Image: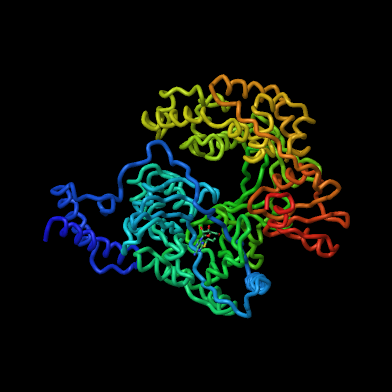
């Protein structure tokens, strides 16, 4: 054998064993034997460096992205899925889809689906050119994602070269996830180093993908499954089931428990089976994805701007456990809202140990009669923090008494206020240390000023040490006192200062969002800077002028005005400007939409997917509509998100029109 042949033979053998181990979970050799093969390859490549190609498994951990990840456009948007939570919703999906196909002239008495497990990770797009992996990109907002190629290459389940040579350019989409065993190991290690642990494998996977050090990413042990192929028509099979088989033949990881289902009955049986069977899997799954098998029919069914009409996600019911409620503490948020939370005896739930759970507000605790010392049922759905469902009354001790909401702020001691008609108690002291800490965390967060490393723990440290008293102090931090903080040191201090320095160059709208003005989310911040051209102009704008900007209603305008009417806030912005932050942005031409919703009244309830309730209200107001708090006969439309509650019942009772999120988005012209 020539050296080139020997090298090719070694690569093929290593890929074979990578596949047995990482894709099939069924190794043929021991870890030690595999390591020996890798050593042999490395020694061989030292002798014949010319033979090293980017496809060699020795090249999985290579160059790191220098500063951050570059953002890139997706070739086709990465859509999301509509969720369903019970059999009826899946059945309704099947009926809807068959009706749509019927209308399109297809005989759709019973259609064929493929049911797959829904992997609880983060979506990834992989590009192969002439069979070589050239790029890995995260989903991002569905239109643009981050180029994380150097991290994707470290995932050994993903082949650097396809098993069969496929000419041209292919895009393969799937999910990156952290197997449960790796998640437990990573968290154990973090606990030992006194670092915050990840709440669940999904967060751990997402955090790992954003890590700038591929060596660290490789150590974490991510894995992946693929389920979608975009490419030239001659390559992509006409049926999804055949795509899955093809991906597998190319050496790509495909979750093996997928099933072809004829009619919705078989789909429901699959969902029912995996509701319990999923516990034995080595990865987290939060549901089933049901997809039309025939790609030509998918075309006919079509998609909205966000979701395909030919697929649906069935979410498994949340897992529950019973544990003791040790006590109820309260937390102070950046807006001053003081909210209770449950401190629990640690209990295993959905693969992680939980000891905290949310409780909405004082009235909610009283209404559900949840008392410190009770045994409580806790539940974990898709959200990071579990919730308390109810007390287990049969286990209640004789000495257990109702909980009392504190009347003073646990941080600054000032008396709490509860405005008429609101459920939430607030600390109104703007100088409250707890409020400031949470505001600073928001200021530094990824979507605001994106100061990496300045999370909860470090915020607490810099504030406690008196190094940062307002946002502007961040830009005058010196290295020495930072380095002297516990667990910091010179290197970490320099890194933080670099991050802070870099944040000076952020767009002006990010700064406006980072200030934490009530109702000013990312979208509103962009609209305002787009409308006025600078934070400075917004600062000076009279109320009427603020409201005249498309999409900005009276609620938002008043909050912005109130913020800038406070001299302390104006001084803060001036200091930030002096520190070199961008306050000038780009003015964009206003769109003329007029008052399309004039004379109509809306009520918004439940959790919307793509926008917050405040953003929804602001959009309605911008189009001349009115937003009210409760449903009456005079309500034009009730806009409902997930878990809508009693307002939906009321609307149905009164015959008020009910809009789901899609219909609402369409109505406001964003559908
Ligand atoms: S198909 C156009 N299949 O779930 C639909 N998605 O809630 C493309 N996901 O963004 C998605 N497992 O990240 C599909 N077997 C699976 C999946 C899956 C997990 C994720 C995916 C998607 C999200 C939607």
Residue 425 in the image, given as x and y percentages of width and height? 72, 42
Q: Residue furthest front?
A: 234
Query: In the shown orientation, is residue 505 left or right of residue 517?
Result: left
Who is closer to the viewer here, 506 or 9?
Answer: 9
Q: Where 324 falls versus 596 (above or below)?
A: below
Residue 373 in the image, given as x and y percentages of width and height? 61, 56
Q: How is the image coloured?
A: rainbow
Residue 587 in the image, given as x and y percentages of width and height? 64, 31
Who is closer to the viewer here, 285 or 478?
Answer: 285
Who is closer to the viewer here, 395 or 295?
Answer: 295
Query: In the shown orientation, is residue 465 left or right of residue 213?
Result: right
Who is closer to the viewer here, 587 or 428?
Answer: 587
| Quadrant assignment, res 271 | bottom right
How many marks on residues?
0
Q: Where 201 falls versus 433 (above or below)?
A: below
Q: Residue furthest left?
A: 1
Q: Residue furthest right?
A: 633
Tell me the quarter of the image containing the N terminus. bottom left
The answer, for residue 61, to whether it is visible in the render is: yes
Residue 540 in the image, given as x and y percentages of width and height? 72, 24
Q: Residue at x 57, y 57 (%)?
A: 80
Q: Where 365 falls versus 550 (above or below)?
A: below
Query: In the shown orientation, is residue 9 left or right of residue 126?
Result: left
Q: Residue at x 59, y 77 (%)?
A: 264
Q: Residue at x 39, y 60 (%)?
A: 181
The answer, for residue 275, to whether it is visible in the render is: no
């Amino acid at each position: 054998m020539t050296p080139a042949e020997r090298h090719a033979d070694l690569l093929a053998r290593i890929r074979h064993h990578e596949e047995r181990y990482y894709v099939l979970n069924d190794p043929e050799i021991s870890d030690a034997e595999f390591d020996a093969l890798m050593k042999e390859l490395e020694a061989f490549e030292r002798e014949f460096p010319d033979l090293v190609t980017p496809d060699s498994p020795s090249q999985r951990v290579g160059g790191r992205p220098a500063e951050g990840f570059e953002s890139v456009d997706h070739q086709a948007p990465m859509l999301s899925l509509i969720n369903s939570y019970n059999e009826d919703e899946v059945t309704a999906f099947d009926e809807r889809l068959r009706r749509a196909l019927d209308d399109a002239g297809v005989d759709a008495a019973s259609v064929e689906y493929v049911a797959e497990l829904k992997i609880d990770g983060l979506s990834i797009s992989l590009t192969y050119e002439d069979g070589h992996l050239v790029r890995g990109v995260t989903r991002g907002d569905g239109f643009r994602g981050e180029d994380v190629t150097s991290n994707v290459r470290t995932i050994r389940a993903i082949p650097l070269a396809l098993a069969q040579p496929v000419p041209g350019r292919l895009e393969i989409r799937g999910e990156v996830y952290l197997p449960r065993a790796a998640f437990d190991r990573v968290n154990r290690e973090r606990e030992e180093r006194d670092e915050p642990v990840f709440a669940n494998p999904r967060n751990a996977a997402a955090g790992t993908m954003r890590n700038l050090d591929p060596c660290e990413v490789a150590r974490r042990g991510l894995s992946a499954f693929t389920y979608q192929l975009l490419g030239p028509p001659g390559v992509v099979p006409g049926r999804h089931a055949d795509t899955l088989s093809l991906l597998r033949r190319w050496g790509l990881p495909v979750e093996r428990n997928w099933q072809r289902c004829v009619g919705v009955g078989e789909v429901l049986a699959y969902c029912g089976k995996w509701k319990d069977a999923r516990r034995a899997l080595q990865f987290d799954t939060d549901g089933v994805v049901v997809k039309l098998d025939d790609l030509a029919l998918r075309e006919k069914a079509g998609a909205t701007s966000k979701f395909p009409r030919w697929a649906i996600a069935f979410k498994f019911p949340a897992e529950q456990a019973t544990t003791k409620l040790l006590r109820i503490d309260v937390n102070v948020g950046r807006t001053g809202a003081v909210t209770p939370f449950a401190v629990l005896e640690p209990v295993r739930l959905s693969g992680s140990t939980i000891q905290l759970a949310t409780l909405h507000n004082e009235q909610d605790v009283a209404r559900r009669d949840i008392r410190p010392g009770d045994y409580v049922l806790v539940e974990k759905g898709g959200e990071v923090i579990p919730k308390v469902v109810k007390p287990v009354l049969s286990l209640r001790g004789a000495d257990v008494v109702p909980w009392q909401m504190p009347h003073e702020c646990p941080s600054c001691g000032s008396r709490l206020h509860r405005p008429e008609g609101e459920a939430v108690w607030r600390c109104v002291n703007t100088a409250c240390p707890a409020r400031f800490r949470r505001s600073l965390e928001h200021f530094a967060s990824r979507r605001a000023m994106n100061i990496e490393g300045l999370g909860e723990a470090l915020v607490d440290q810099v504030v406690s040490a008196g190094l940062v008293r307002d946002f502007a102090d961040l830009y005058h931090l010196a290295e020495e006192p930072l380095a002297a903080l516990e667990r910091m040191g010179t290197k970490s201090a320099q890194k933080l200062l670099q991050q802070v320095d870099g944040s000076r160059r952020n767009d002006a709208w990010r700064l406006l969002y980072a200030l934490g003005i009530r109702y000013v989310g990312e979208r509103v911040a962009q609209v305002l800077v787009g409308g006025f051209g600078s934070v400075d102009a917004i600062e000076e704008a009279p109320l009427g002028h603020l409201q005249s900007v498309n999409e900005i209603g009276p609620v938002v305008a008043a909050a912005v005005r109130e913020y800038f009417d406070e001299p302390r806030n104006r001084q803060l912005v001036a200091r930030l400007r002096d520190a070199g932050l961008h306050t000038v942005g780009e003015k964009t031409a206003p769109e003329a939409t007029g008052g399309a919703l004039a004379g109509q009244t809306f009520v918004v309830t439940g959790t919307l997917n793509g926008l917050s309730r405040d953003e929804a209200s602001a959009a309605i107001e911008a189009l001349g509509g009115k937003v009210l708090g409760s449903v009456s006969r005079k309500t034009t439309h009730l806009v409902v998100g997930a878990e809508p509650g009693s307002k939906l019942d009321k609307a149905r009772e009164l015959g008020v029109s009910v809009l789901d999120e899609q219909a609402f988005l369409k109505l406001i012209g964003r559908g």
